[in-house]
Amino acid sequence: MQEANHCVDFQCPIEFVVDLLSNKWSILILRELFGGDRRTYELLAALPGISTKTLTQRLRELEAQGLVERRIYAEIPPRVEYSLTPKGRQIKPVMAALYQVGLQWLEKETCVCPLVVEEVK
């Protein structure tokens, strides 16, 4: 009989993704980017309570992981936009599932989510 491999023996895929998205700001930044490209001030407005410093740190982390792309436009003043990469868009089914579970648990609709708005289009 062959012994089963346990997640403690290898890097668990679930743990890898949870570690990558381990704070609420990363998840919420991704949620906002599902609505389309965003500039820093748009993300700050959509995420009450996040500081500019924290937003910048989270965006850099998501960019380093290949989930978010940063584009700088040669304008005066410079314009910077953030968007999801194809890898970042792969998280959409997981985010949609989180939205559906949260909706059921709250027993009411509480917000207009970019994931839902995009499906209506």
Image (cartoon, rainbow, N blue to C red):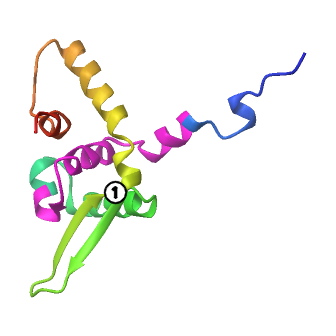
Q: Residue 78, image x and y in percent?
A: 15, 82
On screen, 70 above or below 10?
A: below
Q: Nearer the viewer, residue 35 or 43?
A: 35
Q: Across the whole image, how many numbered discs are drawn on residues?
A: 1
Q: Tell me what residue is drawn at x 62 percent, y 36 percent.
A: 12
Q: Tell me what residue is drawn at x 19 percent, y 73 percent.
A: 80
In the rendered structure, does residue 27 fall within the stretch colored magenta?
yes
* Residue bounds of the magenta highlight: 14-42
Q: Is residue 91 left or right of residue 115?
A: right
Amino acid at circle 1:
Arg
In the rendered image, which quarter contains the C terminus? Answer: top left
Q: Residue 44, image x and y in percent?
A: 14, 56
Q: Is residue 6 left or right of residue 110?
A: right
In the rendered structure, does residue 61 fall within the stretch colored magenta?
no
Near mark 1 (Cα within 10 A), the count class, few <14, some 14-19 or many ≥20, is: some
Q: Residue 2, image x and y in percent?
A: 87, 21
In the rendered image, which quarter contains the N terminus? Answer: top right
Q: Residue 47, image x and y in percent?
A: 16, 48
Q: Tell me what residue is drawn at x 28 percent, y 64 percent.
A: 56
On screen, 90 above or below 98?
A: below
Q: Is residue 81 left or right of residue 22?
A: left
Residue wearing tag 1: 58
Q: Tell me what residue is drawn at x 11 percent, y 62 percent.
A: 41
Q: Identify the image quadrant of residue 7.
A: top right
Q: Residue furthest front?
A: 121
